[in-house]
Image (cartoon, rainbow, N blue to C red):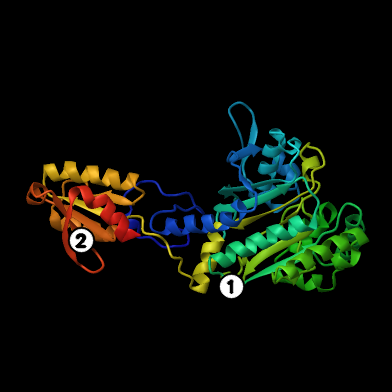
Amino acid sequence: MLPDEECDESSTVSTFQAPKGTYDLLPPNSATYLAVRDAISAPLKNSGYGYVETPGFENVELFARGVGESTDIVTKEMYAFETKGGDKLALRPEGTASVLRAALEANLHKAGNLPVKLWYSGSYYRYERPQKGRYRHFSQVGAEAIGAEDPALDAELIILADQAYRSLGLRNFRILLNSLGDKECRPVYRATLQEFLRGLDLDEETRRRIEINPLRVLDDKRAEVQKQLADAPQIPDSLCDTCRAYHKEVRELLDAAGVVYEDDAKLVRGLDYYTRTTFEFVHDGLGAQSAVGGGGRYDGLSEMIGGPALPSVGWALGVDRTVLALEAEGVDLELPSTTSVFAVPLGEEARRVLFGKVTELRKAGIAADFSFGGKGLKGAMKNANRSGARFTLVAGERDLAEGVVQLKDMESGEQGPVALDAVVETLKSKLG
């Protein structure tokens, strides 16, 4: 259950509840989350991306260097702790730094096949003020292409994310696109922006940010700050010829693929490692928490965490927010039933025989369940209805004596005998 949902505390059985800002995924809602993860990962699997899984915690310094010491994630939101052995660790607040660390540690970049293309799925943790669409524990599917500087790679990832969302039936999302420049032209823009920001009426914390990472001020969501930023210098105006040409090619490739996007000169994202291409997927049906995913190029991150120069690009899409976007659009996913056949035995011999048939059905690839607990016919049929099964197998002593079971179609209500040795083939035929 999601944390913004109300519950009847009087019905709570356990003394313990999920920590504030977290949630448990339970059937039937969990099936939607699984379907979203599958839909996001499907185009990645079809495009050369291999699966990677990293620990739920890493060395604190990995995120301090990679994500950025001035970011809210590191300064305010990261769950950091010291182990009994004195190691300083943090629950992962995002996936890119961990995946890049894993790829470097395994020397995947030395295999000679660049870019190294990886995808991942998991839970991430940030100490934030819990609200709808923003939790302290959240789920993402991400993709990283490590070791190649190519506008086509940036375009590929944006196209794959767009394809994933559209395969789910989402239509009312927008893609925001920008370029942050590189190590050659960004310092010029940085100095220009700092000069502008120093003349604004800003609080002390924001003024400190101006000196550390002024681009992060552009990402400030407060209305009073955004009003003062109306005349701020624009990043695209400071791009060097190389970055301008790079961004132009990314846009042309997206145009050719029919992917619609909006140029957003103030888009910087919340992480320090981005360079050049930066993008965000937003859904206006989600209110304040409108971002459902995003990413960009991070050409200098490998060096920041002690690796060689490996220009890279990637994204992460929020599973939680994608589910909320589906709800906002009224999209109901077609989810397969968890059970196709439900077996109801009447008597001990029938329990033995039907349990064996359930095992056979499962081996044949048919989702089957069994009436456990020795329930009578009425109670067992209620369970069969609740399971969502299309067919029910019912057998008693008389049926077994005749070498049959009763097969009931739960949709039409039709029922008839089927020979015991023909049950599997009959159900395979009926279920297609």
Q: Position of residue 398 (x, y in %)?
A: 7, 50
Could you tell me if residue 53 is visible in this image? yes
Q: Residue at x 88, y 51 (%)?
A: 183
Q: Is residue 369 left or right of residue 249?
A: left
Quadrant location, the C terminus = bottom left
Q: Secondary structure at mark 1?
A: loop
* Quarter holding residue 223: bottom right
Would you place residue 297 above or below residue 106 in this image?
A: below
Count residues near mark 2 (Cα–Cα under 10 Å), then give few for <14, some for 14-19, many for 20+: some
Residue position marked by numbered label 2 in the rendering: 408
Circle 2: residue type = Lys
Query: Given the image, on which type of amino acid does mark 1 rest?
Result: Arg
Tell me what residue is drawn at x 89 percent, y 65 percent.
196
Residue 288, numbered circle: none
Report which quarter residue 356 is drawn in: top left
Asked whether residue 75 is in view, the answer is no
Left or right of 325 on screen, residue 419: left
Say how many tags the image has: 2
* Image position, residue 278 (x, y; %): 75, 60
Residue under circle 1?
171
Dot 1 alpha-carbon crowd within 10 angstroms: few under 14, some 14 to 19, many 20 or more: some
Q: Which quadrant does the N terminus fall into? A: bottom left
